[in-house]
Amino acid sequence: MTTVPLEPVAAPDTRWRVLRGRNASDRLYRGALTALALMLPLLLVAFLGELGASAWPAIRHFGVRFLVTSVWDPVAEVYGAAPMIFGTLASSFLAVLIAVPLALGVAIYLTEFSPKWVRQPIAFLVELLAAIPSVVYGLWGIFVLIPFLRTYVVPPLRALFGWTPFLSGVFYGSSLLAGSVILAIMILPYIAAVSREVLLAVPASQREAALGMGATRWEAVWTAVVPYGRAGLIGAVILGMGRALGETMAVTMLIGNRHDISLSVLQPAYTMAAAIANEFSEATTNLYLSALFEVGLILFVVTVAVNALARLLIWRVARGTAVGSRAL
Amino acid sequence: MNARRLRRRLVNGTMTALVGALSFVAVLALVLILGHLVAKGASSLDWSFFTKNPVPTGETGGGVAHAIVGSGIIVGLAALIGLPIGIGTGLYLAEYGSGRLGWVVRFVADVLNGTPSIVVGIFVWTWLVRPMGHFSAFAGSVALAILMVPMIARTTEELVRLVPHSLREAALALGYPRWRTSLRIVARTALAGILTGCLVAVARIAGETAPLLFTALGNVNFNTHIGEPMEALSLQIFQYATGPFDEWHRLAWASALVLMGLVLVLAILARWVLRSRHGAAR
């Protein structure tokens, strides 16, 4: 008789464990998924470790001078990355300057003004710009964009602003201007897609309130919708900036690849990504290779910081969603 | 009062026209690029372009069969490595990702999504090429897989999260264990979306050049061995476009047209899968 009460005590316990999802196969499933998910953070750590270790000789040898001097002489083993850092920042800045009005125009038009039937097609076409491979942009840039700039853009620009230092020197084609224009086209779809999602996330009541008070459509957009999504829009622009900083192939093919700091947009320049692409396979000495790794490390750290900033800003508006991951 | 109203209506009209015009310019850029690709590349597409290997420099003719096959192998292998990891990470984020680790993984995925592909290239070089002592298609595939994983993880997560809770609850109530619910019910329901995400990711990496420069390297000969350097369409375009010969430029345009065609087919296929399967389920 004493054994009877023991039975019902044990049974609910196992059933409870099943319901909590704590049986062996569930644990295995969860463990396997966790292991896969852990690979990404580990990869980031490995990235920093490998790049840091490979760049260490150059960091120790040159210190801060690496960032501020402009001599890049593989024969004398003296390396200063200032021209590339300048070129990277200048080309990305110019690209953002050109792309932002276009991208915001697309986003505002598609969310606020366009007839419904053109929305999907135009959004699809603009996002297709993101599907074009970088190297195809480069090809198009060399054979179409540069001749176009030489014939139709540079002469009138010169006539108007030729007296400024920004347009001095002879225009051979490959230049900061060509690189920036191609970058602008390349980052346009990213900025447009994220801006559009941010504007779509703005509650309809914002628009309705403004329109209800007698605002025109544009005033509603400019005073109620855009300010509401401001953080997300800034995030979208910074995200585009991040893309531009690390873009390699098209820029390598168009920017001219010269270790030189020139204020003129018509002169060749260099970017960090282009330097790695061009010189990595020629780097014969350890210090040369290490210097290129330091360039890569700087590029990586800068893009990580820029992307992190952009993500935090976008998450504030469109919380937790993978905004922009659908851009294509 | 009337002048003010006129001014406001004028501003409204001008800005409406302006944003419309800006959208037109953006679409025009796409049309121009695709148009030039077709105009300059289509005439070179013939049977020998797809079936022949390159001829020595200076001679005309020849094709890019080695690069087409190479691209297929490198991208296919990258998908083989990247898809399981990406989908698994996405499932983790959707099913268990509400805690601190989930936040970290999500953030790292978004940050890696924006990592310059050239940096991935030199990372894989230190990781695989330097220890192995030679360039290989396998290293190229690993580099492309690294680019794929964060993209796939985030789209998978987003689409799995769209699956209604009632489905999951129904399965659990019927006594399904969690792992079977997750795989057979939740992932199954989101399958069309996940597939779309994978196609989009493959389309994106198919045109990547920078990560292959120091991994797959390129090869003038036909090669199907993944332990050896291999040519890819994108590498081929880079070499031909920056070279000095007209014949190379002609082949570059044709290769670019083929590559763009592949990418477009994948992108449109992705749309179609999403619309035909997912649209019906909603």
Image (cartoon, coloured by chain):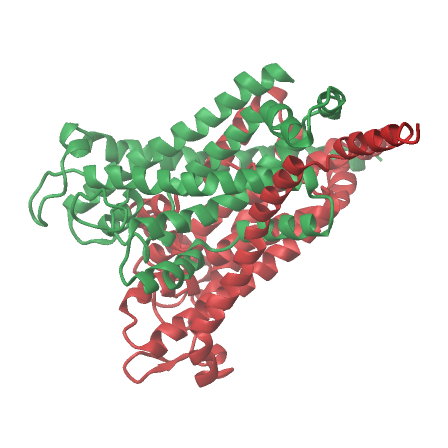
Chain colours: A red, B green
**Which residue is rendered at x = 58% and y = 48% of the image?**
A35
**Which residue is rendered at x = 31% and y = 37% of the image?**
B72
Is residue B61 visible to us here?
A: yes
Report the side of A203 relative to A120 (left or right).
right
Report the side of A233 relative to A93 (left or right).
right
Of the pair A61 and B190, the residue shown nearer to us:
B190
Q: Where on the picture, by quarter, is residue A55?
A: bottom left
Q: Residue furthest front?
A: A1
Report the side of B71 relative to A234 (left or right).
left
Q: Residue furthest top?
A: B280
Q: x, y (%) of residue B219?
A: 21, 50
Q: x, y (%) of residue B250?
A: 19, 41
Q: Is residue B107 above or below residue B199?
A: below
**Which residue is rendered at x = 49% and y = 54% of the image?**
A244
**Which residue is rendered at x = 77% and y = 35% of the image?**
A17
Of the pair B48 and B25, the residue shown nearer to us:
B48
Is residue A192 visible to us here?
A: no
Q: x, y (%) of residue A66?
A: 46, 79
Q: x, y (%) of residue A135?
A: 35, 47
Quadrant in the picture for the N terminus of chain A: top right
Q: Residue furthest left?
A: B59
Q: Is residue A63 above or below residue A195?
A: below
Q: Is residue A322 above or below residue A278?
A: above
